[in-house]
Amino acid sequence: MVDDFHDVMALAIEGSGTGIWDRDVISGTIRYSAGWAEILGYARDEISARVEDSYGRVHPDDLAYVQATMQDHFEGRTSVYEVEHRLRCKDGSYKWVLSRGMVISRDEQGRAQRMVGTTADITSTHLMAERLRQTTNLVANLTNKIPGLIFESRRAPDGVARMTYVSSGIGEIFGLTAEDVAISTAAIHDRIHPDDRAMYHASLDASQRDLVSWQCIFRVDLPARGLCWRQIDARPARLPDGDTLWHGLVTDVTERMEMEQQLHDLARLDHLSGLANRRAFLERMEKTWSALMQERHDRVAVMMIDVDHFKSINDRYGHAAGDEVIRHVAAIMCSVLRSSDMTGRMGGEEFAVCLPGLGLEEAGRIGDRLRAEIAETQAWFEDIAISLTVSIGIAPMLPTDRNGEQVLARADKALYAAKQAGRNRLAFAENTD
């Protein structure tokens, strides 16, 4: 046990209403931070280190549950120790606390040696929950005004589940009524997107098995609204008959998920050209390479494209004109290439194209058409017509490649050969071994 453990951790959580404990299972002792002692109104030196004394502070009605939960964790049946219970304060009153912990050291036989954890004062939260449970009308009036669906769900060990309470938000969240889920939650499961059902059920099973918080983000397909995103946050409790009871909230997170997707897409987009940026292009290349390895593609060709004398264009007309040239080349690429082809701007005046299903001969024809189209058109900047050409290097993706970037290196080498040969032309990778 580190000598300054309590001092360091106490400073970290000072004033948070949370305390830290460190239990030596072998010696039967347990040490507490000053913050832990303060929860119960003690000074730290007033708290005994004997484990027996710690159990003596537990409310008699909670003791068996606390000890059984602790033993389950010691024996490896749960990944963490987590329990809500009451502790006796110095003045004789009781506080509700949430204790969480984990065994961090075991001997060669797997027996617990050391365990650390935290205890948080949840008295106010627990009292509020108790008051809400005491008056059904009050619960209904409060929960029906909260956006989303507040629920109580009960699930048997065999997986059969029903909603024992739902707020009026079930209509907005799932397009259902309380009667639809009073006997079975199957109607909710039918609303879940097929691709998300396995994940949904796995998270629910884990929460029931380990009594851990149930958190899940998934899609639902609603008759009136189409595809929407939902998030569940609920906490389970084991009932005496073996059923599991959850109290939780389901919220509509469609706007948030769509915004996250937009941000994700923006992070993968080159804003000047409108094409995929280097990172996004390389990710797609890796997927194409994997498909080739799995024989889902019989052949793949890759092009590297570079604007000839681009520096001269920038020097003569300015960088704004250079930006217009980049946009012009990207637009022609999109008009010439197939919808299945992948395009990206690799940086500066350099572009890349991945052509699934094409060999070198077909890729060469497409590349030459692209080269000719660029040479025969002009990029306009203000009232200036800018003529330009490109050089192109082409290489096949090979089963012997270690990854997608290896073929890009060969295509880049072919591009350099095209530049050396006079520009405004194609070159093919010579070494395909």
Image (tube, grey):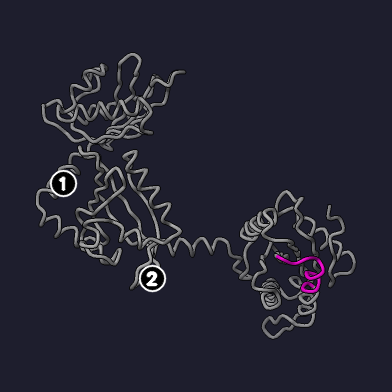
Q: Quadrant of residue 120?
A: top left
Label disc, if present, on residue 128 of the rendered structure:
1
> Which residue is at the far bottom?
383
Is residue 362 highlighted in magenta?
yes
Q: What span is in magenta? A: 357-367
163 relative position to 188: left or right: left
Total marks in image: 2
* Rendered position, 370 above or below 413: below
Which numbered disc, 2 or 1, marks the residue that appears first in the sequence?
Answer: 1
Q: Position of residue 95 (x, y in %)?
A: 17, 34
Q: Please give the name of the residue rendered at 76% of the width and 80% of the height, measured from the top-left corner.
A: 373
Cα–Cα gap, marks 2 and 1:
37 Å
The mark lying in front, picked from 2 and 1, is 2
Report which residue position mark 2 lands on.
226
SS label for mark 1: helix
Q: Residues within 10 Å of mark 2 (few under 14, many from 20)?
A: few
Q: Nearer the viewer, residue 310 or 266?
A: 266
In what element is the residue under mark 2?
strand
Q: Is 182 displayed left or right of 303 in the figure?
A: left
